Image: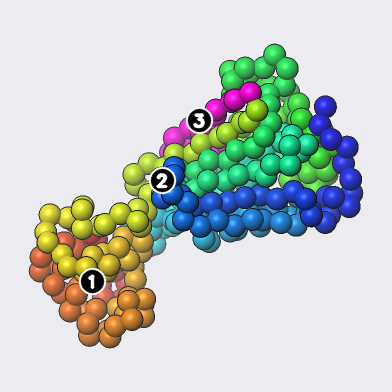
Amino acid sequence: MGIVVDVNWLTEGDKEYIEIGYFESDSELLYQDEVHGSILEQVDKAIELIYFKYMRAKITYEGIYRRERCFVPDAALREAPLNAICHKQYESRIPIQVSVYDDRLYVANVGRLPENWTLENLMSKHASLPYNPDIAHIFYLAGFIESWGRGIEKICDSLKADNLPMPEYTVHPGDIMIKFTGPEDRIVRVNNKVNDRVNVHVNDRESALLNYLAQDPGYTVTQLAEMMNVSRKTIAGYLKTLKEKGAIERIGTTRTGYWKIK
């Protein structure tokens, strides 16, 4: 079962990699990356790339305090690719794939459940039976994983602690996929027109400004001016107009507050 570990393969990582793509829809891939290096390095590299380029944090404010929250917590996002690496059928030479959408994320790999296992076995407490025990042992020695088969339990616990939906597993004869779904209060729908959410008419520039505020309600006039390549005076005018239209309101002070889209 599994493959024999080649130390050079583990450290050089020439053949195996993680593929990450951002999708606007199932049929429209907007951009993608490949994460190379040793498999010991790939997990951290992939997680960093997902957080900084692919999955946008929902930014909210509680009084003057800013909160950034994604719909997949750190522990779950780390455990999912670790599980995939330990259970992947490497003879397929097909990369682990992470598909990111505005409101969901999938981690898929070519693999299979242990013999006579069902999805129910997978989701309940079980012994550690990785497809690649040598690779799993390397990750165990490196402190990445435990030896108790608690990966899925840890994923579910982290989601539950953050009041997020439980993951959905899909098991096909040749691959296994986990799906994380984001609740509406954690989703940043950058590719949708924000003016669809408001009940007033806005022009293209005002709509662009609303999209920026949807990403981060705490953006300053200076930051907005730089991103939209216009003057601070122009941004102030847009904000004043949107406020008069009832599309936004200012919460808090000029220095410590934020804009709320109605």
Callout 3 secondary element:
strand
Residue drawn where x is 63% and y is 23% of the image = 173
Q: Earlier in the sequence, mark 3 or mark 2?
A: 2
Say whether marks 3 and 2 touch (CB < 8 Å). Answer: no
Residue tagged 3: 168
Q: Which disc number belongs to residue 25? A: 2
Q: Choose mark 1 or mark 3, whichever is in front.
A: 1
Give percent across and percent down for residue 167: 51, 33
- At label 2, which amino acid type do we have? Ser
Q: What's the magenta region?
A: 155-173
Q: Which disc number belongs to residue 205? A: 1
> Does 171 appear above or below 247?
above
Which quarter of the figure has residue 94? Answer: top right
- At label 3, which amino acid type do we have? Glu
Q: Choose mark 1 or mark 2, whichever is in front.
A: 2
Residue drawn where x is 55% and y is 28% of the image = 170
Visible in this render: residue 41?
Answer: yes
Q: Earlier in the sequence, mark 1 or mark 3?
A: 3
- At label 1, which amino acid type do we have? Arg
Residue farthest to the front, as pictured = 27
Q: Choose mark 3 or mark 2, whichever is in front.
A: 2
Whole-angstrom CA distance, mark 1 to mark 3, is 39 Å
160 in magenta: yes
